[in-house]
């Protein structure tokens, strides 16, 4: 089964164990990766200012070469 689904044998085992314990909830997709905003360096105001600067100016105007 794992080979057919291109997943690890461990994943199939985890799915089966989850199915045996709480059926449908075990197979519901969950989001993966970092949560939105996790490890952000800029606060929302500064982030918006950077975005607006990139929209208002060309790379050469800011001393950058090439395209963004």
Image (tube, helix red, strand yellow):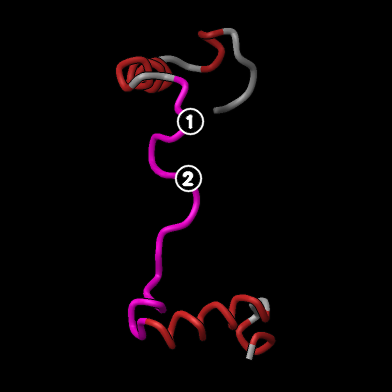
Q: Residue at (41%, 59%) from the top-left corner? A: 31
Image location of residue 15, percent across then percent down: 51, 80
Q: Quadrant of the C terminus?
A: top right
Q: Is residue 37 above or below residue 10?
A: above
Label 2, residues with CA under 10 Å away: few <14, some 14-19, many ≥20:
few
* Residue visible at 60% across and 84% down in the picture: 5
**Whether residue 60 is situated above or below residue 40 in the rendered picture:** above
6 relative to 44 in the view: left or right: right
The span from disc 1 to disc 2 (Cα, nearest Å) is: 9 Å
Q: How far across and how far down the image is residue 2, in percent? A: 65, 85
Could you tell me if the residues under marks 1 and 2 are in contact, i.e. CB atoms within 8 Å? yes
Residue found at x 64% / y 17% = 65
Q: In the picture, residue 7 is in which quadrant?
A: bottom right
Q: Residue furthest left?
A: 45
Find residue 35 and report its horizontal and vertical position in percent: 41, 44
Q: Which numbered circle lies on residue 34?
A: 2
Q: Which residue is mark 1?
A: 39
Q: As rendered, which of 26 and 2 lies closer to the eye?
A: 26
SS label for mark 1: loop
Residue 13 picture quarter: bottom right
Span shown in magenta = 22-41
In the drawing, does residue 35 fall left or right of residue 64?
A: left
Mark 1 or 2 closer to N-term? 2
Which dot marks residue 24? none
Main SS class of the magenta portion in the image = loop
Q: Residue at x 67, y 81 (%)?
A: 9
Does the magenta-highlighted stretch encompass residue 1? no
User: Total of numbered circles in the picture?
Assistant: 2
Quadrant in the rendering for residue 49: top left
How far across and how far down the image is residue 33, in percent? 50, 51
Check if residue 32 falls in the magenta segment.
Answer: yes
């Amino acid at each position: 089964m794992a080979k057919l689904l291109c997943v690890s044998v461990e994943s199939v085992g985890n799915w089966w164990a989850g199915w045996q314990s709480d059926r449908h909830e075990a197979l519901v997709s969950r989001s993966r990766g970092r949560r939105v905003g996790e490890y952000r360096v800029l606060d929302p105001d500064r982030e918006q200012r950077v975005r607006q600067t990139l929209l208002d100016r060309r790379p050469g105007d800011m001393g950058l070469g090439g395209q963004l």
